[in-house]
Image (cartoon, helix red, strand yellow):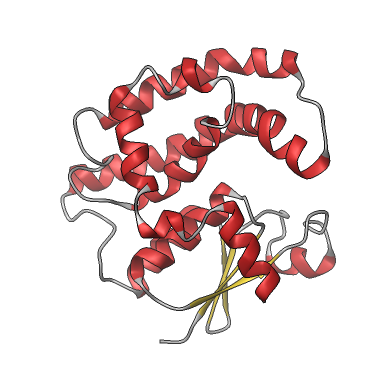
Amino acid sequence: MSAFTVHSIPGSPFGRAALATLEEKGVPYRFSMVAPGTLRSPEHLARHPFGRVPVLEHDGFMLYETQAVLRYLDRVVPQPALTPADPKRAARMDQVMNVNDWYLFHGVGNVIVFHRVVGPRVMGLTPDEAAIAAAMPKALTVFNELAHLLGGNSYFAGDTISLADLMVAPAVEFFTHTPEWPALGAPHANLVSWLKRMQDRPSMKATTWERVSELAEAA
């Protein structure tokens, strides 16, 4: 099988989800860095007309939107399977992936994580405390629901890892680096245990911000 190329930015939780999925599949891939500030460049817009990451390239086939990328990888590299065969478990996986996109990221991660982690680290910005405070009610709802959906399972779709875990873990991990974590994630013992379980996986260790930055420098 020919190698895959992931066009992304080190530190992107969506890009990390794609890279971690490739790691879980055990297939070769290349990381192609999209330099900060070039998301609207003609070169990148030719790959992704909405100026986002990641973009997957495989045999001349270009694909964007993280959920589509993860599902494509699970189809073209079927083992190990990352989508449950049981329809209800697969539906739970789909649900959690959509919670990530629509609620964990929009209005929560792209506010709190941006102001606490990404903005200060990448752009030297000072956190906007008012914006963070305004995002907290929705953030509390999201984390409460993630803990509810996880329940007593080891992973979101049951006893084995699925695409949902690989998509949500990179996003949730960012919150552990914020002062909001004790209010958001720490009260949920099941969520904390799940995150530790994910962080211990080789796929997550191989795709940290630091490790992906090393891949970018070596490219």
Q: Does residue 202 sit above or below 11 in this rendering?
A: below
| Residue 72 in sight from this viewpoint | no
Drawn side of residue 107 relative to residue 98, left or right: right
Looking at the picture, does residue 213 appear above or below residue 144? below
Residue 209, percent from left and from top: 59, 52
Res 197 → quadrant: top left
Position in image of residue 52 (x %, y %): 68, 53
Nearest the eye: 210 or 11: 210
Provide residue 59's location: percent of width, then percent of height.
53, 84
Q: Report the label total.
A: 0
Identify the residue shown where x is 50% and y is 76%: 29
Q: Eyeballing the image, is 107 above or below 38? A: above
Q: Is residue 206 visible?
A: yes
Looking at the image, which is closer to me, 197 or 162?
A: 197
**Residue at 53 percent of width and 53 percent of height:** 208
Residue at the farthest bottom position: 1
Q: Residue at x 30, y 23 (%)?
A: 189
* Camera-side residue of 15 and 49: 15
Task: Decide if residue 131 is on the left or right side of residue 112.
Answer: right
Q: What x and y, as percent, mark residue 69?
A: 48, 62
Q: Quadrant of the C terminus?
A: bottom right
Residue placed at 44% from the left, 39% from the top? 98
| Quadrant holding the N terminus | bottom left
- The front one of 49 and 208 is 208
